[in-house]
Amino acid sequence: MASTSTQQRQKDPTFRNYSSSSAQNYAKNRPGYPEAVISLILNQHTSTGGALDLLLDVGCGPGTATRSLAPHFQHAVGADPGRSMIETARSIPSTTASGEPVTYEVCASDALSSLSALERYYSPADGSRGGSGSRKACDCACVDLITAATAAHWFDYPDFYREAARVLKPGGSIILWCTKGFFVDERTTPNAKKVQALWQKFENEVTRAHEMPGNRLTRELYAGLPLPWSEYEYAYADRDQDRKEQVDDETKRLLGVFDEKDYKRLVFNDHGQVKPGEEFFMSRRVTFEQSRRMLGTVSPVTRWREANKDKLESGEVEDVVDQILRQTRELFDEVPEGKGRDWVEGGEALVVMVFKKKKA
């Protein structure tokens, strides 16, 4: 059993504090997930008996994954602690299988049972639908699937699992996933080995220098992410007051609704490995301009730019994104087949983690 001692609350300081323009830029330039990934998520849920009534996407940002999942559910709710992210999500039309719009609400991962958007879906013992004041925070099991797309590394643990246990129906699922790195397709990329070495250097020397513990979790494909059955010595340590709290009995009871034997951790294309005849699960073909905009939404890049703001404005240093794309183009130009090429082709590693709440 994994052991997790004192837990630090690793709240993301970048995305949750985005301005409206930054959130809109994120929504415009951060690509969604391929249909193969969405199908995998849905299959992992339905193949284990999960229903397609109510979806809750946690850490939804501007609704990138929510909009891809919502058409498969009768109802959908997106939750994120960033107000600008939620405002941006609301501005982008998205509907469910029933034709109703997706509901978006400002809410952190440790307060899911307080979501007002869930009140209408709560069915008490008498079988009636919910409504204002009809549910209690600890008695609102109405969600079929909880998802988190490249967001779970910013959640508070074990608080997230406690709240998920409260709002999930018996037999419901939690599915968390994230990607890491960028690996060029050696079968189609000019000067592939040099290009891959360049992108690896960018990760090692730039992004790692400005990453937070949450970013490291994604780089490790969530291998170190706390699990419901981890041995939590403390719920958390308050960074301001150095306050420690033991996990209470109620939290222990709620964590116990997730069965370890039903847990899955699925990894695809780690280290850029692709089997003969197959493609990256998270395949990407992007122009240099698309790459420029996409990399600008990566949180360590944002922090690098903030740390080097004065040097960038004075022209003392080259922007890290401009630099890697310039160097990639130069490596392409070293070989005949790369001359004039203005796109990068490859993919990312992917991990999908599946948890099931025990049936009543």
Image: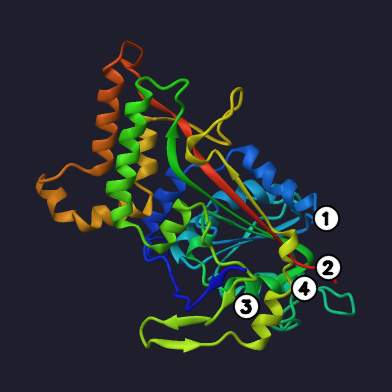
Q: Nearer the viewer, mark 3 or mark 1?
A: 1
Which numbered disc covers residue 49? 1
Left or right: 170 with respect to 188?
Answer: right
Amino acid type of the residue tagged 1 in the rendering: Gly
Residue wearing tag 3: 114
Amino acid type of the residue tagged 3 in the rendering: Ser
Residue 249, x across and y down, in percent: 66, 87
**How far is disc 4 from disc 2 in space, using C-alphas?**
17 Å
Above or below 82: residue 24: above
Q: Nearer the viewer, mark 4 or mark 2?
A: 2
Q: Are marks 1 and 2 in contact (CB under 8 Å)?
A: yes
Is residue 171 shown to the viewer in this render? yes
Closest to the observer, 165 or 19? 165
Residue wearing tag 4: 122
Above or below 38: residue 328: above
Closest to the observer, 272 or 41? 272
Residue count near mark 1 (Cα–Cα under 10 Å), binned few <14, some 14–19, many ≥20: some
